[in-house]
Amino acid sequence: MFEIDDIVFDSRTLLKCMFGCNDWGKNHTCPSRPGFPMPWEFEKILRRYSYGIIIHTHDKKLSQKISYELERSAFLAGYYLAFSLSDCSSCETCSCVEGKECRFPKTARPAFHSVGIDVFKTVRSLGLPIDVLQNDTQEQNWYSAVFIE
């Protein structure tokens, strides 16, 4: 669990998306998409929530699945504004690349960093593991979250 003040917002994450991500412009949940809110806009929106749940896995698809299922459960329990963040992994190749609409608009969600959240500082402050990977043999930590009012 986290309180909203535990989330570290830093709009510099946009720079890492723009100049460090191989998927820039190739994903419907990417900040490069027309109309996608800027990190400072997301911060204003997300700060309206009170608390949430962080999900930690070593598998991107599992992280997204769990966070969306928790979002749905929270919604059905009366938390109708519950919202999950995860690095979308619904498709092998996003339909954005083909110039087509999203195939899974109900479950596609943006990643932490794409909405201006400093994942490293946030999860470290919560006592969770995360490191910059030094080589391809290291296991990646995947994080998603569900925000609840």
Image (tube, rainbow, N blue to C red):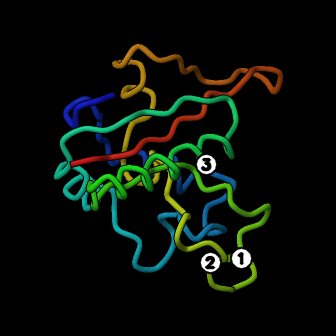
Query: Residue 128: x percent and y percent?
Result: 47, 17
Going by the numbered disc 2, the residue's amino acid type is Cys
Q: For this rendering, which residue is in front, 70 or 100?
A: 70
Q: In the shown orientation, is residue 64 left or right of residue 147?
A: right
Query: Residue 103: x percent and y percent?
Result: 67, 77
Q: The residue tagged with tag 1: helix, strand or loop?
A: helix
Residue at (18, 42) in percent of width and height: 50
Foreground mark, 1 or 3? 3
The residue identified by callout 3 is: 65
Q: In the shown orientation, is residue 83 left or right of residue 40?
A: right
Q: Which mark is residue 102?
A: 2
The image quarter in which residue 82 lies: bottom left
Query: Residue 87: x percent and y percent?
Result: 57, 50
The alpha-carbon separation of the residues under discs 3 and 2 comes to: 17 Å
Residues at discs 2 and 1 in contact (Cβ within 8 Å): yes
Q: State the residue lying farthest toward the front.
A: 77
Q: State the residue lying farthest toward the right.
A: 137
Going by the numbered disc 1, the residue's amino acid type is Ser
Q: Which mark is residue 95?
A: 1
Query: Residue 125: x percent and y percent?
Result: 34, 18
Q: Earlier in the sequence, mark 3 or mark 2?
A: 3
Residue at (51, 74) in percent of width and height: 33
Q: The residue tagged with tag 2: helix, strand or loop?
A: loop
| Quarter containing the N terminus | top left
Label 1 CA crowd tier, 10 Å (few <14, some 14–19, many 20+)? some
The image quarter in which residue 142 lies: top right
Q: Earlier in the sequence, mark 1 or mark 3?
A: 3
Q: Earlier in the sequence, mark 2 or mark 1?
A: 1
Label 3 CA crowd tier, 10 Å (few <14, some 14–19, many 20+)? some
Q: For this rendering, which residue is in front, 44 or 58?
A: 58
The alpha-carbon separation of the residues under discs 1 and 3 comes to: 19 Å
